[in-house]
Image: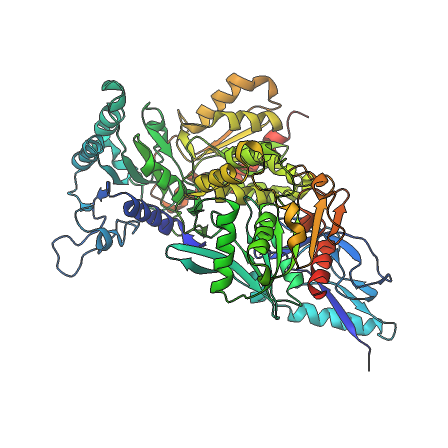
Amino acid sequence: MSVKSYRQALNEAIRQEMERDERVIVMGEDIAGGMGAPGEDDAWGGVLGVTKGLMPQFGRERVLDTPISESAFIGCAAGAAATGLRPVAELMFVDFMGVCFDQIFNQAAKFRYMFGGKAVTPLVIRTMYGAGFRAASQHSQCLYPLFTHIPGLKVALPSNAYEAKGLMTQAIRDDDPVVIFEHKAMYDEEMEVPDEAYGIPFGEANVTREGDDVTMVAFGRMVNLANEVADSLKGSGISCTVVDPRTTSPLDEETILETVSETGRLVVIDEAHPRCNMATDVSALVSQEIFSDLKAPVKMVTAPHCPVPFSPALEDVYIPSTAKIEAAVREVVGKGH
Amino acid sequence: MSGQIDPIVMPKWGLAMEEGMLVEWQIEEGTQIEKGQEIADIETTKITNIFESPTSGQIRRIVTSDGETVPVGFLLAVCAGDDVSDADIDSYVEDFKANFVLEETAAGGAAPESVEIAPGQSIRYLTMGNGDTPIVFVHGFGGGFDNWMLNQEALSEDHKTYAIDLPGHGGSTKQVGEGDLAAMTGTLHDFMSIMKIERAHLVGHSMGGGIALNFAFDHPGQVASLSLIAPVGFGTEINMDYIDGFISQTRAKKLRAVLELLVNDPAAISTDMVEDIIKYKRLDGVGVALGQLRDKIMPEGRQASQLKDRLDDLVAPVQVIWGRNDQIIPSSHAEGLSGRINVQVYDDTGHMPHLERASEVNTLIGDLAASV
């Protein structure tokens, strides 16, 4: 056990799986870097350094720098997965999905269905998401709801370094296509992470706080904000449950319904745009299944329905904040007594 | 010239403890206390426990009040005689607060180490204290060295102590070999050989009790005394709902219900304890290791090894400690033992007397070790 960053935890998971299983390969733009420039091998390790050190250990055969063509290398990874390898492809920013989505949702996600259950596609797509980086509207989006919508894809959102290692390991060992969303503002966040390999099962939510008054269901980086709010509201006598679903597909409906039944109040926190996102999905689930257990209307805290602003001042207002989450919690707790 | 002032500070229970909450004082200012007297309840993220006074004297000042959380080593109360003035106590408290720094030992203290006992097989252990014949603690099924967090430090005042992670557990490698008591006993012997421990006081809990006892049969010359806490090997019954639930439950809520079988008071099972076990069980190889131990040590729901008939062969002094309300291995297994074995069965106690009755169990272990 030692303290590792989110970045190191992801790197360690990939490295340990590459050591364990030689079918595991990684590919993407500049994931090693320095191709063709003598003395500069492994110059990048990916745009934020997650894959640094893999190329010197495993060689260019298993760590493939690709041309800047997502449609080519994501398609290539899907094909490699269907024919015996276990590729981990890096889609640098999820915002670039537009040029390779056919390979993901019409090809990789459909192979098992269209080939009579005989094809397996153990493909992992790592991708960066989230605002807060002053990277403007084409490099800051939270597009996991789009992937969650597609049957045949699994979608994971690690909320800290421990989760990152376990979910990445699980993703690589899974026989279906998995898209793993890494929040770009979390790479330097550190915590204790076991040195040994471990997987965290998909579809099992983590209840990070247990309380009586309100349940917060939060996704990805928002889990940490929800935890912060839960801890600070203790002093005001408001006791919160926080649920980190870990994966949006499959979704652990059981834990969400059980914890919301217990508290009777729900606040869903989702950094994605408000229409057809995880917040609406969870709200619908709860309204349909346990409406009679609710003591107050469900409250959603999300980004607004507009592109991520480039202006730092506007971007800060755009992202769900602890203040907004706290206000939502106070509002629902004030009802239904 | 003023008399002596004794500080009472926040204790450190277990490696991870950095702070604790003083739940409630059981004494007040002016009370005359004795060393070992129960003076407060203290809660950490891992455990809630009774705090016994480390000193004797009169409580002159309570510094940390009910409900307050303070770091390890911080002043809880001040003990002093009548010859010390209130002003001196005021300035002592002020000085303490002004000079208090979070010590390295509070955050870290002794750190666990690993030793390779065979190629590719390592054992993690925690050692504390100094002395001639060490005490070696052996945990039970699914446990680890931190099961002894309320025992090891206390006993390390007079002894060198080792608490190990058995194969398949904690930070040790996860291969368990044959996975039976003999294999575990062999590992303990390998560990002691490599650590150059020629003779030790063995303290074993549950499965670890069976391992310690089996070790004493195999290597009688290396055992100075044996303290067996709710050990296997004394009967055939064992609660497989616990064993199977421990292995199979992956969700906190369901696992908590299983772990509550361990103790008399379910509140003793903290959220952190549940979370730590879930994380441990996710590590590669743990599921296989636990399954193997179950299949060999308790095949078909019954204990495989019957050891108690051979107790009379042992030369070393033996004591058997049990909780009357043990829901894992019934305390009736402690009945009918020969008179030379000291048997202690605690009321209102479950399968974990070393946690639930820590100080009493520590006294028993210390006294037995001192008697040889």
Rendered-image quadrant of the C terminus of chain A: top right
B186 sits left or right of B325 in the view: left
Rendered-image quadrant of the N terminus of chain A: bottom left
x, y percent for residue A168 = 36, 41
B190 sits left or right of A184 in the view: right
Is B257 in front, or is A80? B257
Q: Residue at x 30, y 40 (%)?
A: A126
Any part of residue A304 in sight: no
Name the image quarter holding residue A262: top right
Any part of residue A95 in sight: yes
x, y percent for residue A90 = 26, 41
Name the image quarter holding residue B11: bottom right
Residue lying farthest to the bottom in this orientation = B1
Q: Is residue B203 above or below residue A109?
A: below
Is A122 in front, or is B61? A122
Is A102 in front, or is B37? B37
Q: Residue at x 55, y 33 (%)?
A: B245
B98 sits left or right of A315 in the view: right
Q: Residue at x 39, y 24 (%)?
A: A276
A90 sits left or right of B309 in the view: left
Is B317 in front, or is B364? B317
Question: What is the total number of numbered labels drawn onto the structure image?
Answer: 0
Residue lying farthest to the front in this orientation = B313
x, y percent for residue A21 = 27, 43
Q: Residue at x 73, y 46 (%)?
A: B337
x, y percent for residue A39 = 15, 61
